[in-house]
Amino acid sequence: MSDIKLVDVSIRDGNQSIWGATGLNIAQTLQVAPIMDRIGLQAIDFTSSTHMGVCVRTHKQNPWTLIRGMRSAAPHTPLQFITTGFRFISWETSDPEFMRLAYRTLVVNGISRFALIDPMHDAQALLDGARMIRQEGGEVLAGLTPRKTCPEVVVKSSKFIKKSVNILGGELKLGDGERLAFRSICR
C-alpha cells in the first residue's frame, strides 16, 4: 500500500486566499506550529513574497522573524515557499542576482522547499529559477500550468527546452545530471 503524504496549505494559501493574507499574524501562526509539526506532514506550504509583504505592511511585523520562528516551532516539517521565479513582492521582474540573494536568505532562515511557477509560461525562466534555487540549497517543485491542452503545451515546451516531458508528471533534465521533479496539471 502506498503512503499518502499531505502538504498543509492553510497558513499560506488559506491566509492569502480567504483573508487577503491579513488574517494571521506571527503569534497566531507560531501558536499552531507545534501541532502542525506533530501531524507528520510532508511539508507546510508556508509563505510567499506577497505574504511577506503583507506581514510588513499590514501587521508591521518582520517576516524573517516569522520564518525563523516557524522553523524553530516546527523543526520536523519542511517549510515551503511559493514563488514565481524572478518576482519578489511585486509583479516586476527582479534582477537574477537579487533573486539569488532572496533564495539564499530564505534557505538560511528555514525555507527548504520552493514551489516554483511561472505565470508567463516562460519555460526557460522556470528552469533558470529552479537551477538557482537548487544552487542555493533549496528543493524545487515546479509547476507547468498549461494555457491550452496538455499535449500541445508539452510538445511546445519539449521543443523549446529540448527536453523530454511526461504529461502526467515526471522530471526535467537540467543538464549535468540534475533533475527537476514537476507535476503538470491538465484541465
Image (cartoon, grey):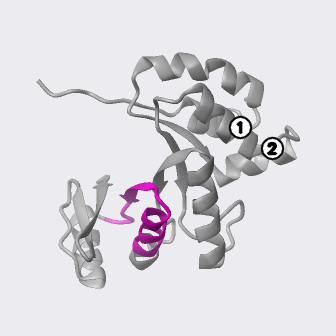
Say whether marks 2 and 1 touch (CB < 8 Å).
yes
Highlighted magenta segment, given as a residue range: 127-148
Residue 95, quarter of picture: bottom right
Q: Is residue 66 above or below residue 156?
A: above
**Residue at image location 61% in from the left, 31% down from the top:** 72
Q: In what element is the residue under mark 1?
A: helix
Q: Residue furthest right?
A: 60
Instruction: Say which amino acid is labelled 1.
Output: Leu
Magenta stretch contains residue 141: yes
Disc number at residue 46? none
Q: Is residue 63 left or right of residue 135?
A: right
Residue 113 covered by magenta stretch: no
| Residue 87 visible (yes or no) | no
Quadrant (top left/top right/bottom left/bottom right) for the N terminus:
top left
Residue 122 as seen in the image, left or right of residue 162:
right
Which of the 4 quarters of the picture holds residue 97?
bottom right
* Residue 120 point in image, percent of width and height: 50, 71
- Crowd class of label 1 (few under 14; some 14 to 19; many from 20; radius 10 Å): many
Indicate whether 146 appears above or below 38: below
The residue labelled by disc 2 is 62
The residue tagged 1 is 66
Drawn side of residue 27 relative to residue 148, left or right: right
* Residue under the point 20% across and 54% down: 168
